[in-house]
Image (tube, helix red, strand yellow):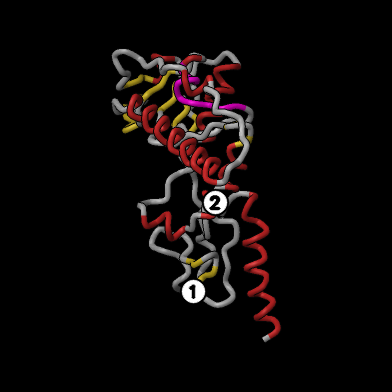
Amino acid sequence: MVVGSAQSGGQIAEDLVQAGRTVFLATGRVGRLPRMYRGRHISVWLVLSGRMDITRREILEQGPIPGRPLQGALHTISLQSLSAQGVVLLGRLTGVDDGRLSFSDDAEEHVRHADEGSAMVRSLIDEYIARNGINAPRAEPDPAEVIGALLPNPPIRSIDLVARGITTVIWCTGFIGDFGWVRLPDVLDAQGQPLHENGFASVPGVYFAGLPFAISRRSGTILAIEEEAALLADDIRRRLDA
């Protein structure tokens, strides 16, 4: 049983089913990215088109910060491609009671949401290519995205772990840092997470580096290291010289 269908959940589910395991995947409302599109890695297009430069403030104006989308390391992974390999797609995990797991009936919605997210990104890249007159290959259908989803019929709403022979549950539901050791006023919020602006805490000389979406979509990825490190280093140097 894999719980969570973003990057880790999708990749782990595929690794397990290809190793001959019976895999159940509790899905969520997560976007998806193709690995390659029109001759380039999707990350290259996202950087060139400016999508990775969208700021944290702009993202928050649209609602809660979304999780990282499902993306394969070597090829595109979709919920439907996983189902074609034998992964059993379930809805969101809603409860656990005495060894029995309960699920909502929204796996089909999650497939559709991921499809729409991928289509939106591809459309934005198409617009960027056309606007800048870039000579890029025509879009080709991605096998992982054009295949239909194989969903249990009727949907599985409950699973008894023992009856199904499931001995392992892998939780891929995201994580947050433990900043409990930071004992300074006005540095952490009510959930114990950093209060900051572009990595700068309200307490002078306190910084947070490498946080997801700290400044922009780049934050929390290798793409942000040079920019964010320089920003913090410049402030440290300015303080030392003052």
Q: Is residue 77 magenta?
A: yes
Q: Which residues are magenta?
A: 75-83
Above or below, comparing residue 148 to residue 54 in the picture: above
Q: Is residue 98 left or right of residue 241?
A: left
Above or below, comparing residue 161 to residue 72 in the picture: above
Question: Disc 2 residue type?
Answer: Gly
Confirm whether residue 12 shows in the render: no
Residue depicted at 52% across the width and 22% down the height:
141
Cα distance in 3D space between marks 1 and 2: 29 Å
Q: Is residue 170 left or right of residue 107?
A: right
Specify few, some or many for label 1: CA neighbours under 10 Å numbering under 14, 14-19, or 20 or more: some
Residue depicted at 42% across the width and 30% down the height:
115
User: In this view of the protein, which residue sits in the foreground, 122 or 227?
Assistant: 122
Residue depicted at 38% across the width and 36% down the height:
29
Residue found at the very far front of the displayed protein:
133
Confirm whether residue 167 shows in the render: yes
Looking at the figure, which quarter contains the C terminus? bottom right
Question: To which residue does mark 2 refer?
Answer: 50
Q: Position of residue 151 (x, y in %)?
A: 37, 17
Question: To which residue does mark 1 refer?
Answer: 202
Residue depicted at 38% across the width and 51% down the height:
64
Q: Position of residue 148 (x, y in %)?
A: 42, 17
Q: Is residue 74 magenta?
A: no
Q: Position of residue 226 (x, y in %)?
A: 68, 59
Above or below, comparing residue 173 to residue 185 in the picture: above
Q: Secondary structure at mark 2?
A: loop
User: In this view of the protein, which residue sits in the foreground, 92 or 43?
Assistant: 43
